[in-house]
Image: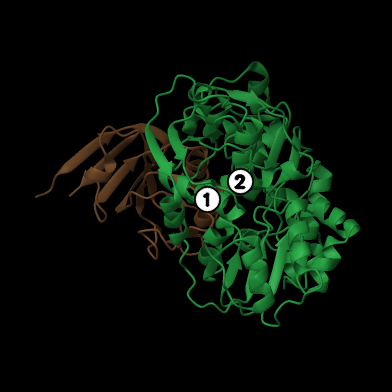
Chain colours: A green, B brown
Amino acid sequence: MKLTDDEQRVLDGSEGDARAHAMDLLLRYGRALGAERLVDTDNVCGGFVGALPGRRDLLPPVPEGEDRDMDAVYSLLNLDSDVRLDIPPVKAMTYRLIDAMDPDKADVQRVSQETKQIVADVNKFCGKTGINACNTCTPYQIGNMPVHGQHCAWMESSAVVYINSVVGARTNVEGAHSASAAALVGKIPYWGYHTPEGRRGTHHIVVEHDVQSMLDWGLMGYWIGEKVKTKVPILSGISATPPPDKLKHFGAAAASSGGVEMYHIVGVTPEARSMDDALRGNVITDTLTFGRKELEEAYGYFSTATSRDVDFIVIGCPHASLTQVKQVAELLDGKKLSPNTDLWVFTPKALKTMADRIGYTEKIERAGAHLMSDSCAALSKVSPADVKVAATDSAKQAHYLPAIMKFPTWLGSTEDCVNAALTGRWDGGLK
Amino acid sequence: MNKTITLKGRSVVSGVAEAEALVTRQRISGFGGTDAMTGEIIEVRHELCGQSFKGKVLVFPGAKGSSGWASHFQSARLHGNAPAAMIFTEMTTKMALGAVVTRVPAVTDLDQDVFDVIKTGDIVRVDGTNGTVEIKR
């Protein structure tokens, strides 16, 4: 790794201990990667400070009558520092990803007093350091839409694959520590998807099935991720330009089953005007066909549930767009959920505000369902009491719920999920 | 019959550790795939589901899944459940950062197929400083 004079000065402490430590962390990380240098970034999205379960039990106790020392928390959990550092304001434009709860639904989500307090402490810290606490896995839906070619340092695999592939921005999947360090110094290792050669396609996926529904797109993403793992698939055979929501589901699924951080769709995504454009001199490693058989194979991966009595339905993973919220509102309008089910729909707070204004929220909540923000069932580990069987319209959420929450989980269309919430019975699946 | 096989590769995180190997040809998820409180693999479709990497030399292709990978492995370390060392074959940002914050010796780019050479239960010495691995049988 070769540092510029400015980077070296920061490493030497010219801007204080926290920025020096951040630079050192990025240097060690860059060396581990085999990177040769850092690149400037002014767009960071990260999971900031450990309010999430599994992390919060690492927080030091707060002395009676004192405020939580958030700088100490950030030093340990976000910068992996053994000593407490004074955390200065962030240098890069920085957005926060998902939080541990929705403050407006804290009781429904059954979060502890401790969680509420940590969430409040973290928000205060975000204000102090200049981190935009937007608390969503989809910053690109609420105003952080990078420019084509912009070097970013984002966490959240579903957001990374979206901005790399659909927008043409440049980011690797960062972790909490690298994103937190990047926020403080405005740098990230120049490696992988930052480089033109790292973005070239490797596998050709010939799409023969007429992929239409959100479920189809999710299953195709999951299947491709399973096959190409962390490589860069190029899809051909997609004739009509898919809407953002379908690409959002597709990428999220491919990132969870395999680790896909970038894909190309010939004639659709910005770096794939043609097959040659997507390959840029690369040789295709493998060619795979995605047809009806593969769609069924993908659906077969989701076989954790057997009982058709469902009690918890999750929609909005990644966080739902206003279009998806509207669809749920229309499906629920004038109806009542089964007394045996809960339906939670997750969307960014900014979109929830619009849903409130338009009346979608009222239609959803009058039916007995909840429109929630800031959080997610699997990541925030929130659920109703005594869930036995869950259902979701998201391949990504269906991947995580059985592992994290131990809920056997059905996967189906949004309509299947709403029907299950209304009847208490699962009658969905691949049509 | 005691014999030692030596592999040469590239240092990712320095330090030396020797322990029993836990080998999988499947990538590992951090968040949602492992439990930081026990070191167990919890992904239901993973071949190591139910087994713990705590104190083992973890031999695997690399990281997959959520970007919380490094946080998860840092948590495992802080809870005392980290692997003793890591040997992996596929470099990704999750893997590099995860190795850095797990702070255990880590190597990659070894000169033989580690999945052919190293078996679960082998005693393996990982020299992350020099990028070498010794397998003792």
A389 or A245, nearer to the observer: A245
x, y percent for residue A100: 70, 60
* Disc 2/disc 1 C-alpha distance (Å): 8 Å
Residue at the image point whose x is 72% and y is 41% from the top: A140
Residue at mark 1: A256
x, y percent for residue B106: 40, 41
Residue at the image point whose x is 68% and y is 43% from the top: A244
- Seen from this angle, which residue lies furthest right? A357
Q: Is residue A315 left or right of residue B117?
A: right
Could one spot residue A85 in this view of the protein? yes
Q: Amino acid at mark 1?
A: Ser
Q: Amino acid at mark 2?
A: Ser
How many discs mark residues in the rendered view?
2
Q: Chain of mark 2?
A: A
Question: What mark, if any, has residue A158 been given in the picture?
Answer: 2
A23 or A232, nearer to the observer: A232
Q: Residues within 10 Å of mark 1 (few under 14, many from 20)?
A: many
Residue at the image point whose x is 51% and y is 78% from the top: A307
A114 or A359, nearer to the observer: A359
Q: Is residue A219 left or right of residue A392?
A: left
Could one spot residue B128 in this view of the protein? no
Q: Please, what secondary structure does the residue beneath circle 1 have?
A: helix
x, y percent for residue A78: 64, 46
Q: Please, what secondary structure does the residue beneath circle 2 have?
A: helix
